[in-house]
DNA sequence: TGGTTAATTAACCAAGAGGTTAAATATAAG
DNA sequence: CTTATATTTAACCTCTTGGTTAATTAACCA
């Protein structure tokens, strides 16, 4: 699982990480800001690890400012993931269309020929 | 990692599984059809396992027809995943806009006042 | 019945993910 | 120089993932 797209999807496959991205979509945040909502459920090092997964996937960029590490969201890998999905979603919708058309034909042809 | 969205993203986080979905986007296929391109790299049971991951994520539906198991793609979970992403993509693009606006302000204000 | 093809299950293994606690680092502030 | 705050690293543990080979099930065919 070394390719970028896999890393992106893997990063998204965790509700904690998705929540952190959601938080970051509202603006920059330090590690402890991000950790806040989760400290009831897990330790700070656990959050650091999640953050690292997001960083390695390129979804988050971490700066430095004194002892704080302000984190920013980077949407680019997201766009690539969406692109991958859309590419096939089109095919899937076409499949649905074909199915729809097929069913329609069957129904229309039920009387074995056109009406009128 | 028990929620549907996580299962979907996790299922997509593997190039073998993505390739299987890509194949299925061209139409129905049996397990051995799907396995074909990968049998140089892995065994059939490995493919079965990948398929099971896709099934549990609801991305693939497996029927039966004699000894074959015709597999079909189900795009619905995909749509939900895209929806999740789009929801935040909007925010991300806005962030980019704000960044752009900020840089623009800085440049404009460089001469400390408006040019005539 | 016995054989062939398609696919799954079982039992196992190595590596990775996600968590922990305790110790270390980085920066600021007395 | 010491202390406080923010964050990371180290060492460890358990469960899951992704793979294996060997055996099993399911359905057809002769």
Image (spheres, coloured by chain):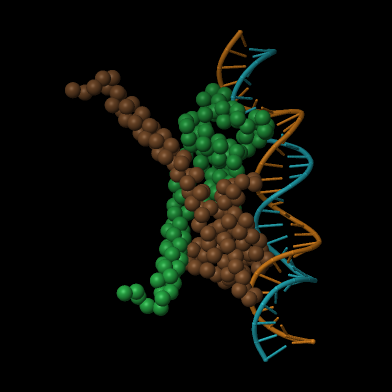
Chain colours: A green, B brown, C orange, D cyan
* Picture residue at 61% right of the left edge, 46% below the top: B3
Residue B39 in the image, given as x and y percentages of width and height:
62, 69
Q: In this image, A77 relative to B112: left or right?
A: right
* Picture residue at 47% right of the left edge, 54% below the top: A85
Residue A111 in the image, given as x and y percentages of width and height:
41, 76
Residue A70 in the image, given as x and y percentages of width and height:
52, 29
* Picture residue at 64% right of the left edge, 46% below the top: B1
* Residue D27, picture quadrant: bottom right
* Residue B102, picture quadrant: top left
How many marks are shown on the rendered structure?
A: 0
Position of A80 relative to A67 (above/below) = below
Q: Nearer the viewer, residue B2 or B104?
A: B2
In this view, which residue lies farthest toward the left?
B116
Q: Is residue A61 visible?
A: no
Tell me the quarter of the image containing the C terminus of chain A: bottom left
* Picture residue at 46% right of the left edge, 66% below the top: A99
Q: Nearer the viewer, residue C18 or B114?
A: C18
Q: Nearer the viewer, residue B106 or B99?
A: B99
Residue B57 in the image, given as x and y percentages of width and height:
59, 54
Position of A75 relative to C6 (above/below) = above
Q: Is residue A15 visible?
A: yes
């Amino acid at each position: 699982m070394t390719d970028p797209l896999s890393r992106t999807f893997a990063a998204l496959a965790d509700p904690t990480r998705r929540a952190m991205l959601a938080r970051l979509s509202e603006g920059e945040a330090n590690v402890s800001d991000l950790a806040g909502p989760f400290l009831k459920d897990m330790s700070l090092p656990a959050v650091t690890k999640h953050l690292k997964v997001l960083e390695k996937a390129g979804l988050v960029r971490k700066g430095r400012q004194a002892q704080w590490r302000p984190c920013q969201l980077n949407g680019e890998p997201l766009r690539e993931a969406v692109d991958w999905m859309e590419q096939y979603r089109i095919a899937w919708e076409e499949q649905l269309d074909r199915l729809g058309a097929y069913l329609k034909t069957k129904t229309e042809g039920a009387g074995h020929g056109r009406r009128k």
